Image (spheres, rainbow, N blue to C red):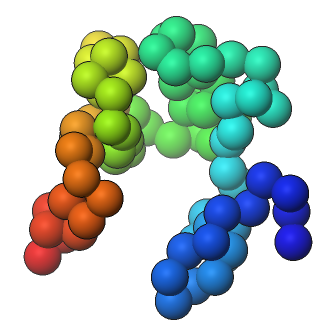
Amino acid sequence: MNKYAYSVPIVGELSNLFDKIFYSHQMGLSKPDPEIFKTVISEANINPKETLFLDDSPCNVKAANELGITSLLVENPDQWLDWFD
């Protein structure tokens, strides 16, 4: 297991859900600096308008929103699950 791997119920390692995971400490960037979002958009070749960003920090959500990324503030661990029901 990757030393940066995170466990996710049912699927196991977070990497089982995504093609690539961007860790800020590995990128040398940090939120809410817009560069981290721009780098992810570029490297993942994604459209910000078709991207969902979830975070528990209002300033990170604001920074992503300013780049056109749909962003939601998560205030409790299970809150985001309700958005998909």
Q: Position of residue 70 (x, y in %)?
A: 26, 37
Quadrant in which residue 65 is drawn: top left
Going 55% across and 74% down the picture, which residue do you hit? 8
Residue 82 lies left or right of residue 54; in this view the side is left
Name which residue lies at 86% across and 57% down: 3
> Is residue 75 or residue 18 the one in the foreground?
75
Question: Which residue appears at 68% of the width and 17% of the height?
Answer: 29
- Image x and y of residue 27, in percent: 77, 26
Q: Measuring from the top left, give residue 52's x and y in whole percent.
A: 34, 46
In the depicted structure, whether residue 56 falls above or below residue 64:
below
Nearest to the observer: residue 36 or residue 68? 36
25 left or right of 31? right
Position of residue 28 in the picture relative to residue 46 (left or right): right
Identify the residue at horizontal 66%, vertical 63% (top origin).
Answer: 6
Q: Would you say residue 43 is visible in this rendering?
A: yes
Q: How many marks?
A: 0
Residue 50 visible in the picture:
no
In the shown orientation, is residue 9 left or right of residue 43?
A: left
Between 43 and 77, the residue placed more toward the observer is 77
Above or below: residue 45 compared with residue 20: above
Q: Quadrant of the N terminus?
A: bottom right
The answer to which of 41 and 10 lies nearer the viewer is 10
Image coordinates for residue 23, horizontal then vertical, percent: 69, 39
Q: Quadrant of the C terminus?
A: bottom left
Q: Relative to 33, is 30 above or below?
A: below
